[in-house]
Amino acid sequence: MSDASNFLELRSPAKLNLFLHIVGRRADGYHLLQSAFQLIDWCDIVGLKLIPENEIRRVDPIPDLPPEQDLVVRAAQLLKDFCSMSGGVEITLKKSIPMGAGLGGGSSDAATTLIGLNYLWKLNLDIHTLSELGLKLGADVPFFIFGKNAFVEGIGEQMRELTLKSQTFLVIFPNQAIATSRIFQDPELTRDHAPITIDGFLASPLLNQSNDCQAVAVRICPEVKQALDWIRRVLPDSAPCMSGSGSSVFTALDPKADTEKLENLLQNLPKGWVGRIVRGLNRNPAYNLISSE
């Protein structure tokens, strides 16, 4: 983290859904979920620089992404309007987390923008207030503001801190984005998974590791199955799983795994695929900038 009175550069982490179960559906159509969210050290970099001009200025915007759809711009504008701030901010974003990968990169960037501007603008908003604002931007944004690994329920708004053992993961993005709406509108999606308890998950995390979105994703996006099969070939004893609504897949690595050999194999992934060995994090790197818990 780089810190000055008018500038911050913050790491914005991705997350994995260690499992994802759909346990029901509300009358308004929203799906009721259970999941375990694990922060990982695959990070974007968000830069925030205060400027005297009364505007949100995006440096090097993502091609073909209009400002009204750019989550960091929307987050900054939302906070500026909420607090009636004069002056503005110049935002840079160095993307590393693939877009549309089910890793929460956009939501994380939005949360980091809210956290960083809360600090730079000296607003002293608490986590609850920031989370309510973040929910207007996306269902996963409050998790990154929460800033710790979590057992998640409801439509994603109910979070309890999870203490997870230190772990390393292999993550592969097969270069295909899947629209979340496409998954959740599919008539064949499992919507009646029996609920589990947080203690039940912690007692048998591997037993509960499944993703109810995966079967639909495999059917509509062959690359998901190809990525799962790639991991199974390279790590025959592994149990790979898709993260979120896809299309990234992952597996936890045995502590004795030959990571150097794996890194070499990742150099030969199909064209356009991205593979990384990542470590789990306990906290969002920007967490301590929030004024209070």
Image (cartoon, grey):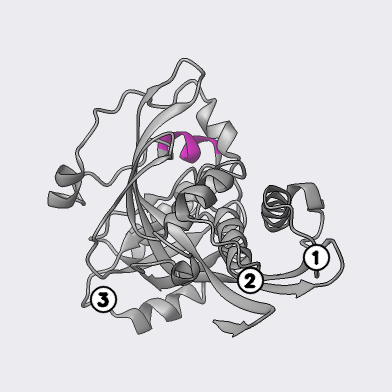
Considering only order in the chain, which callout, 2 or 3, is on the residue closer to the N terminus?
A: 2
Left or right: 57 with respect to 261? right
Q: Quadrant of residue 158?
A: top left
| Residue 272: percent from left, percent from top | 62, 64
Q: Using the rendered image of the protein, determine whether residue 200 is visible from the camera's viewpoint.
A: yes
* Residue designated by label 1: 87
Q: Quadrant of residue 91?
A: bottom right
Task: Report the span colored magenta.
Answer: 215-220
Q: Residue at x 45, y 67 (%)?
A: 287
- Nearer the observer, 160 or 280: 160
Crowding at mark 1 (Cα within 10 Å: few <14, some 14-19, many 20+): some
Q: Amino acid at mark 1?
A: Gly
- The residues tagged by marks 1 and 2 sit, at their Cα atoms, a distance apart of 12 Å
Element at badge 3?
Answer: loop
Taking the view exactly as shown, the residue that stands out farthest to the top is 27
- The residues tagged by marks 3 and 1 sit, at their Cα atoms, a distance apart of 51 Å
Magenta stretch containing residue 130, yes or no? no
Left or right: 131 with respect to 56? left
Q: In the image, which disc is placed on residue 120?
A: 2
Crowding at mark 3 (Cα within 10 Å: few <14, some 14-19, many 20+): few
Quadrant containing the N terminus in the rendered view: bottom right
Q: Residue at x 34, y 80 (%)?
A: 259
| Residue 250: percent from left, percent from top | 39, 58
Q: Are marks 3 and 1 in contact (CB under 8 Å)?
A: no
Quadrant containing the C terminus in the rendered view: bottom left
- The residues tagged by marks 3 and 2 sit, at their Cα atoms, a distance apart of 42 Å
* Residue designated by label 3: 257
Q: Using the rendered image of the protein, determine whether residue 247 is visible from the camera's viewpoint.
A: no
Q: Amino acid at mark 2?
A: Leu
| Residue 60: percent from left, percent from top | 80, 69
Magenta stretch containing residue 216, yes or no? yes
Q: Amino acid at mark 3?
A: Ala
